[in-house]
Amino acid sequence: MRLLVTGGSGFLGEYVLRAGAARGHELTALARSRAAAAKVGWLGAQPVRGDLADPGSLAAAFEAGRCEALVNLASLGFGHAPAIVAATKAAGIPRAVFVSTTAVTTTLPAASRTVRLEAEQEIRESGLDWTILRPTMIYGAPGDRNLSRLLVLLRRTPVLPVPAGAGLQQPVHVADVADAVLAAAERPGAAGLTYDVAGPAPLSFAELLRTAASAVASRTRFIPVPMPSVVAATRGYELISRHPRIRVEQLRRLAEDKVFAIDAAARDLGYAPRSFADGIAAEAMALRLAA
């Protein structure tokens, strides 16, 4: 199958391109820079120059790809959905898989939530044979921006304050998300449907921490701190930091239960995610932090 991939040089994109090449797909990947073009080429895709922020270049790139399906891994949180949909239709690409996020279900007034929901609605009304995938927190390899930092911290820190009152978590391994993306593109029966893509079972935050600590043979002592105190401290940190590594919105989101059914994805896509214990152990090994 000839696939056109956006976001191919990103974290999830690397796994999708590798797995897509292994499955025998012909891959074209949008690249807005020489570095991105070099990376997607190294991963087995034919790069085509284009920029999601430039609708003119996007239309030309999609047309040049001559592909059967679009796999959009690029974030839907930046308002590019109308241009992506228009370029896909203009290029005569009938099938399209879009990766969104379960974060759109938050009850918090997150700025990106509205943009993402509008993007999803644009996709549903596009007339394309679309599928939307909503992954939970993705982890599994260096650079995941989520649990890789936690593993490093656990290996080095004997005592760690953690927010009390955190909700249930259901993180998903990046390779499992990549498999779901490709399965959605390959299966016509997935058209017109939205799937939550999560780990096999929800975990308490305490269980997540213990499992991650075990993966790096850490004896870190966790000290629960009331969530309001953590939020207040983080708000001050945001004010003085030019590039804060954690934000108040993230902490408040941590307090929400993130529990999602994966039955539909299992039924229609053959989705069978690995356990968190297995996934985080593999990540610890990749980071050379495992005991």
Image (cartoon, rainbow, N blue to C red):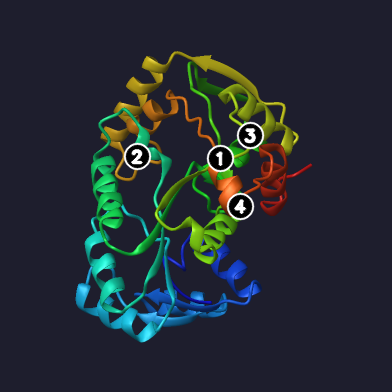
Report the mark closest to the observer, 3 or 2.
Answer: 2
Judge left or right: residue 268 versus residue 245.
right
To which residue does mark 4 refer?
Answer: 176
Q: Amino acid at mark 1?
A: Ile
Q: Residue 104: which disc? A: 2
Q: CA distance from mark 4 to mark 2?
A: 20 Å
Q: Amino acid at mark 2?
A: Val
Residue 171 lies, with reference to residue 91, above or below; the image says: above
| Numbered disc in front, either 1 or 2 | 1
Judge left or right: residue 56 versus residue 245: left
Q: Are marks 1 and 2 in contact (CB under 8 Å)?
A: no
Q: Residue furthest top?
A: 226
Q: Which residue is mark 1?
A: 262
Name the N-terminal-most of marks 1 and 2.
Answer: 2
Question: Decide: marks 3, 4 in contact (CB < 8 A)?
Answer: no
Real-space Cα separation, disc 1 to disc 2, in angstroms: 17 Å
Observer-nearest residue: 237 or 57?
57
Check whether the beta carbons of the residues at disc 1 and disc 4 lie within 8 A of each other: no
Residue picked out by circle 3: 154
Question: Which mark is first along the chain, 4 or 1?
Answer: 4
**What separation in Å lies between label 3 and label 4 (alpha carbons)?**
25 Å
Name the residue type under label 4: Asp
Of badges 1 and 4, the one in the foreground is 1
- Closer to the chain start, of discs 3 and 1, is 3
Front in this rendered view, residue 209 or 261: 261
Vertical position of residue 46 compared to residue 268: above or below: below
SS under mark 2? helix
